[in-house]
Amino acid sequence: RDREQDRAGSRLPPRPQSFVHDRPRGIRLSSEVAHLREVVHAMVPGTSSVPYSVTCSVPAPLVGALVGRAGEFVRRVEEETCSKVDISRDGDVGRNATRAMTVVGPLLNVYAAHALMMQRLQAIERENEARQNEVS
């Protein structure tokens, strides 16, 4: 339906295209995320929709695998979460080199995008570890 009705029958405005209301494909809402959603909805109206950002470090050698071929994975995350993901081209040098990854968008969208990126990073690290164990 384009419009929903509350229990009293009043018409509600259409839902915005946002992760706050529409979960991306493949994401299950855990109890922790459901609780976060409740907390965010209790915030002053409009507060959760202003731009927020989360920045973290990712291992530089894994950035290519993380973003995917021609940035495909990052684009998918951005589309599904209505947020912007940026991984800096500059970073530390050496064996433990890192790059800054910044996610910007509405609060819950940022958390969703960050979680998707971290899930992929962990999967890449597990695959690399499994390959190293096969060689050993």
Image (cartoon, rainbow, N blue to C red):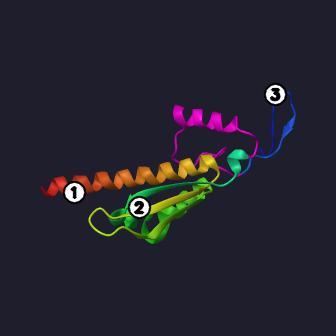
Q: Nearer the viewer, mark 2 or mark 3?
A: 2
Q: Most prominent secondary structure in the magenta stretch?
A: loop
Work out whether mark 2 precedes mark 1 in sequence or the reverse, and give the earlier one.
2
Q: CA distance from mark 1 to mark 3?
A: 55 Å
Where is residue 81? Give x, y as percent: 59, 53
Where is residue 128? Give x, y as percent: 27, 57
Q: As drawn, which residue projects farthest toward the front?
A: 92
Q: Nearer the viewer, residue 1 or 67?
A: 67
The reply, left or right, for residue 45 in relation to residue 34 is right
Query: Under tag 2, what secondary structure?
Result: helix
Residue topped by disc 2: 66
Q: As drawn, which residue projects farthest toward the top?
A: 8
Callout 3, which amino acid?
A: Arg
Work out whether mark 2 precedes mark 3 in sequence or the reverse, and give the earlier one.
3
The reply, left or right, for residue 9 in relation to residue 20 is right
Q: In the rendered structure, which segment of residues is drawn in magenta?
A: 17-46
**Is residue 109 one of those drawn in magenta?**
no
Work out whether mark 1 precedes mark 3 in sequence or the reverse, and give the earlier one.
3
Residue topped by disc 1: 131
Q: CA distance from mark 2 to mark 1?
A: 17 Å
**Is residue 18 one of those drawn in magenta?**
yes
At 57% from the left and 51% from the top, the residue drawn is 110
